[in-house]
Amino acid sequence: MRIKTDDGIKDMRAVWREGNIVKMIDQRYLPNELIIFSAKNADDIHMAIKEMVVRGAPCIGVTAAYGMAQAFEKRVDTSEAASKIKSARPTAYDLFYAVDHMQEQVKQGKDPSEAADDYALSVINKCRAIGENGAKMIEDGYNILTHCNAGALATVDHGTALAPMRVGKEQEKNIFVYVDETRPRLQGAKLTAWELYNEDIRHTVIADNAAGHYIQRGHIDMVIVGTDRIAANGDIANKIGTYEKAVVAKENGVPFYVAAPVTTFDPNTESGMDIPIEERDPKEVTIMDGVRVVSPGSNANNPAFDVTPSRYITGYITEKGIYTPDDLEDMFD
Amino acid sequence: MRIKTDDGIKDMRAVWREGNIVKMIDQRYLPNELIIFSAKNADDIHMAIKEMVVRGAPCIGVTAAYGMAQAFEKRVDTSEAASKIKSARPTAYDLFYAVDHMQEQVKQGKDPSEAADDYALSVINKCRAIGENGAKMIEDGYNILTHCNAGALATVDHGTALAPMRVGKEQEKNIFVYVDETRPRLQGAKLTAWELYNEDIRHTVIADNAAGHYIQRGHIDMVIVGTDRIAANGDIANKIGTYEKAVVAKENGVPFYVAAPVTTFDPNTESGMDIPIEERDPKEVTIMDGVRVVSPGSNANNPAFDVTPSRYITGYITEKGIYTPDDLEDMFD
């Protein structure tokens, strides 16, 4: 991804390896500071995923794969490392997939760091392909709504939901993005806005509450979001609030697209209602950037994800093409 | 309303008169500090409404009425005072109604301060009646969602949306309230949560994004919101985000009630789409409690209200009873 720095424009990834250290942009400090976090063992990887140094399902997957490569190379107890890493967060399927994939690859005799690099490159290439497929749906002059951050920061590079916007920009399409700020952690206001600013893609941030208003008034031509897990029936889990946007989009006849690599599909989860919803610390709601925003006598609930049933989804933009809920199974042909 | 203070429980109103000074709880400092703002002339009243020292349509109306009484008593140019006060905010019908009503009353020979006191008392009594009518819809054990603050702070006393909860509590019904934090200004997290805490009504604050999740999962039995204006066709304008909640409630078969005095109806506004939507300072989105939360290179849009078409509304809880969109006109019988 393109990042404007004091030393000019840099091209960076959200997570990478240097020797046996896993390095990543520490997303807790964005957009104010560009700080690099170094993970030296499975505990560091666990912490980085749990505390959201890295976030976004594909990026979590790659971080986990690099973490497993690190564990294999260091000859520590890799099944312990696997459990530790898998326990960092409960919702994103990529996390479990990446750890299992690494164990499988090594069992088959593959070099761990090569396997991790291949996995990362495959994620990056898939995101690029998602961008190219998704850009076909974006017409010149489109206004696009997105929720949370399904950008390069969430996927190592390019993004899922943001990849079609990046490609659309390359194709010189005139696009404008409405960015839900995405409470409680404000990934839209802090991360998606930052990525779009760095890419010179025109955009504005809105309170999550305002998305419905803009959809109702015809200001939004399409919605594109990422997802953390797609169930076998096509239901998706994504950042809390996605469900509301999908319902309002359908009510107003606005297309609602989910951008994700095929690996986000979890054939073992029958329905969205079977996906566990992570309940995070209420402090993410009550305290914002160190300031208490909820009345002192009151507490908060903080579900991190919600489930959007497939009937609200126009299409799944994948690296293999775009599928509707009705032809989802063709993806595995 | 009941307020827990260091000196015990006090019973206060959101706005009142002391001699020729209009006093009000300065809602910009809640829930952290209980500070009283004193308005001495129409400029102060204009500022108090514009800067949201007071907010909420009925409370703005009473503040405007007190402000007009003050202007009449001080023998200043009352048509200038009327214009000044009316220009403070564009959406709430009560503001214009209260100013016109005061001018009409005085023209008919009524004492200005008596007219303002009568107006305030009438608002308070209506809210109490709204509470009694609305409480009939609340069953023991109900979980209720509310958005923004349509409490005593918004209506001088009792509230509109919160009045049925106060009466339900008096009737010893076991109720639980999900409070949307209500970005960008967080009136739910700061004001509604504070009122419910002071009334010992059980509640939790949620990110606005989470409301849909709780509605979908069957955790919400009913939604009650206030409104700033009801158009002749039953559409309402209310705090940004109300529309999304209404659409999701209807999609899930959850009753959606609007609580408001009959004066909130504006027969001269044909449809909700004719209600002007105030666009407020983007800083309300980009800066929260003094902290910049949006990426520095990005800007924000900040519509303060949205319109919920009448087809999403189960009933209007008024001081005269509860009406459906189909029998709205009976309200004027």
Image (cartoon, coloured by chain):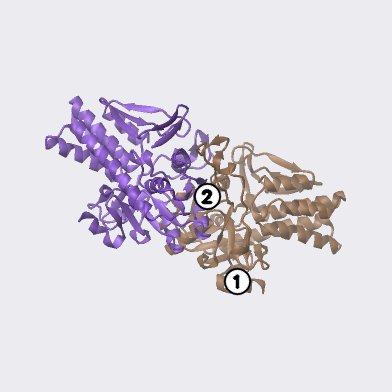
Chain colours: A purple, B brown
- The residue where tag 2 is placed is B201
At label 1, the amino acid type is Leu
For badge 2, the amino acid type reads Ile
Where B319 falls versus A173 (above or below)?
A: below
Badge nearest the viewer, 1 or 2? 1
Residue A131, percent across and down?
A: 35, 48
Task: Assess disc 2: are there few (<14), some (14-19) or many (≥20) residues with their C-alpha within 10 Å of its C-alpha.
Answer: some
The one of A81 and B222 positioned closer to us in this rendering? A81
What subunit carries mark 1? B
The answer to which of marks 1 and 2 sits earlier in the sequence is 2
Query: How packed is label 1: few (under 14 Cα within 10 Å), some, or many (20 or more)?
Result: some
Q: Position of residue B106 (x, y in %)?
A: 84, 60
Dots 1 and 2 on the same chain: yes
SS at circle 1: helix
How far apart marks 1 and 2 lie (CA) works out to 31 Å
Asked if residue A248 can be seen in this view, the reply is yes
Residue placed most toward the observer, B237 or B282: B282
| Image-based side of A55 in relation to B241, left or right | left
Identify the image quadrant of residue A82.
top left
Instruction: Work out whether A285 lies above or below B215.
Output: above
Q: Which residue shows up at 28% across the image and 29% down it?
A: A17
Residue under label 1: B328
* Residue A276 visible here: no
Report helix, strand or loop for mark 2.
loop
The percent position of residue A28, horizontal first and vertical second, equals 42, 33
